[in-house]
Amino acid sequence: MKKINKILKMEKEQRLMLILKYTIIINFLVAVTKFVLAISIPSLWFSVNAGFGFVLIISRLWTLKSYRKIRKIKNKQNQLIEEYKIYLKNGAMLILLGIMYFGVSSYMYFYGTNTYMHEYITYLVALMAFYSIGTAIYGIIKYKRNKNPLIKSIKLTNFANALTHIVLTQVTLLDTFEKNYNSRMINGYTGIAVSLIIILVGLYMILGMQKQIKAKL
């Protein structure tokens, strides 16, 4: 009961960071599941998505660790500067991941994914996708008015992760139930489109935040 009261008394940012701490565990289990599937199927596409997930987990852990250090800074302006630095680094990370995702999606367009699996695995992948998309939408709606750079970076990285889950679900569904040449093209186009969106999100984070920095500092 004391723990619940302590959580309720926390600021919104503190509660979000606490939630982030627990969601990292779930995201880690999802990424491990993808990695296991990548080995057992085997599948290059699952390997790529598992790697993408692990990178985002590392990013969230780093953000969480940085948040604890930033809270110890008494000067609000210096605190804000450090938050901006983390936000910009997350933006740069998304651009890099988007470029890598573009390369893999282009490969998928020309050579396909060869992701053949049992139907129950397809349903498991769809379940993971719904969780990721639901979490991303919830974060965007609940904290849409919050301008804190750390929270905004978490929302946008979650959004990017959700997009990759949509592609992964499409790939598994089409490869399982509709194995033909058109499936390869559709999967490739969707993957390329998502990679471009991720790159644009990263650019938005960097270019948009530079304007805010000039306005506030």
Image (cartoon, helix red, strand yellow):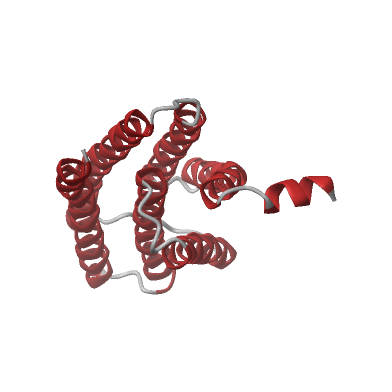
Q: Is residue 122 left or right of residue 162?
A: right
The quarter of the picture where the C terminus appears is top left
Residue 170 in the image: above or below residue 64: below
Residue 105 in the image: above or below residue 97: below
State whether residue 26 appears in this view: no
Q: Is residue 73 left or right of residue 94?
A: right
Task: Give the camera-side residue of 36 and 158.
Answer: 158
Residue at (41% x, 63% y) in the render? 140
Give the total of numbered labels.
Answer: 0
Residue at (85% x, 51% y) in the render? 1
Q: Position of residue 47 (x, y in %)?
A: 40, 42
Q: Position of residue 110 (x, y in %)?
A: 17, 55
Task: Give the camera-side residue of 130 and 77.
Answer: 77
Q: Quadrant of residue 183?
A: bottom left
Q: Position of residue 64 (x, y in %)?
A: 50, 35
State whether residue 192 appears in this view: yes
Q: Is residue 195 left or right of residue 79?
A: left
Residue at (18% x, 54% y) in the render? 200
Residue at (37% x, 57% y) in the render? 159
Task: Give the camera-side residue of 47 and 212.
Answer: 212
